[in-house]
Image (tube, grey):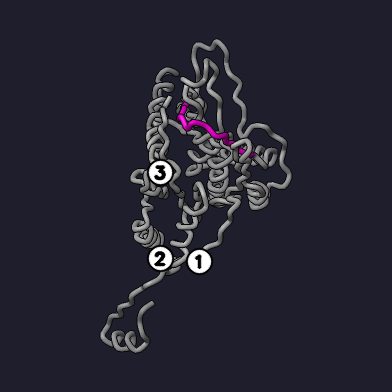
Amino acid sequence: MSYSRHCITSLASKGFVYIQIDGGMYGLPQASLLANQQLVRKLTPTGFVEARHTPGLFVHTSKSSSKPMFALIVDDFGIQYVGKPAVNFLISTLHSDYTMAIDWTGAEFCGLHLEWDYAKRSVKLSMPGYVARALERFGHNDPTPSDSPHKRVPPQHRAKVQMTSLDTSPPLDATASTRIREIVGVFLCYARAIDNIMLVALGTVASQQVSATEATAHACIDLLNYAATHPQDIVKYFSSNMVLYNHTDASYLSEPNAYSQAAGFFWLSTHPDKLNGLTTPLNGALHVLTGIMCNVLSSAAEAETGSAFINAEAVVPLRQSLHEMGSHCHHN
């Protein structure tokens, strides 16, 4: 801070104090924005600019197909480069103003553990110990083995009328409701990053957390049992032509109060022209969409149409990010 004690004393006697802050201040709401603006000013003269439609993605303005780029999340840099001279230039630029720790193996990024296999051109993503710490936090010490994060609802085959369900169980007190919200918050991060099988159950619980009931608490127990049974999930990605694919689906009247679920699976694969009639190979999920549609729909066909529209909205920013990364991608 650029001020003197004498300055503060003299100004305070007049009823006001002016302090100029040259560095960051802990707890300042604007700190993250100011830090980002400072970084942008630092990098722009060197040719690194933030992508127009993808916040946190910085690409170099050179025309080279192997130009460096990096993703920035808070203070974690994930850098893609070909040849160390390019990345050394970025590191030297940052070193002049920032203190950094460098991991050339790329084994950790934003809380994710990355296991690279350059021979097979693949990478495995995991979060070791995350589930174990969460279960300890919530005191779930005696789990029942379960392969599903939610109760299975048996289908009624050939039923002419599909009925919805109503939750008539007693409401939870404030303490129990707070615990429900904490469980959703802790496991939502893990589910989005690693174990997307949890997402539907988390979405259902999250929609009920404001007015949580005993049924909501039982749903959380089902989720914790599944997490304890499968605590070390892994997502594996293979190198591809970065063609963006999306499968959409819907679940009609599967949520309380006659609501329906939208779902979508997004992955990167090979262009259809290069498959020689083979099925498009699946890859690790780039994004998994789950959500309860806000309208009460009158048929399964309406649910499928609504889900397709929601998935199309989700495709747009993903496809734009791929273009900004330099991929000549197609959407199928």
The magenta-colored residue range is 234-246
Q: Is residue 164 above or below residue 99?
A: above
Label whose residue precedes the other's in the sequence (2 or 3): 2
**Mark number displayed over residue 258:** none
Direction from residue 42 to residue 211 in the image, left or right: right
- Image quadrant holding the N terminus, namely bottom left
User: Which amino acid type is shown beneath numbered disc 1?
Assistant: Thr
- The residue beneath circle 3 is 64
**Mark number displayed over residue 99:** 1
Find out whether the residues at labels 2 and 3 contact each other: C-beta distance under 8 Å. Answer: no
User: Which amino acid type is shown beneath numbered disc 2?
Assistant: Leu
Find out whether the residues at labels 2 and 1 contact each other: C-beta distance under 8 Å. Answer: no
Task: Kindly indicate the quadrant of the structure image that contains residue 142.
Answer: top right
**Mark 3 residue element:** loop
User: Which amino acid type is shown beneath numbered disc 3?
Assistant: Ser
Q: Confirm whether the magenta stretch covers residue 238.
A: yes
- Image quadrant holding the C terminus, namely top left
Residue 152, given in percent of the width and then of the height, sits at 62, 27
Q: Is residue 267 visible?
A: no
At 30% from the left edge and 78% from the top edge, which residue is drawn? 18
Query: What is the chief secondary structure element of the magenta stretch?
Result: strand
Q: Is residue 12 visible?
A: yes
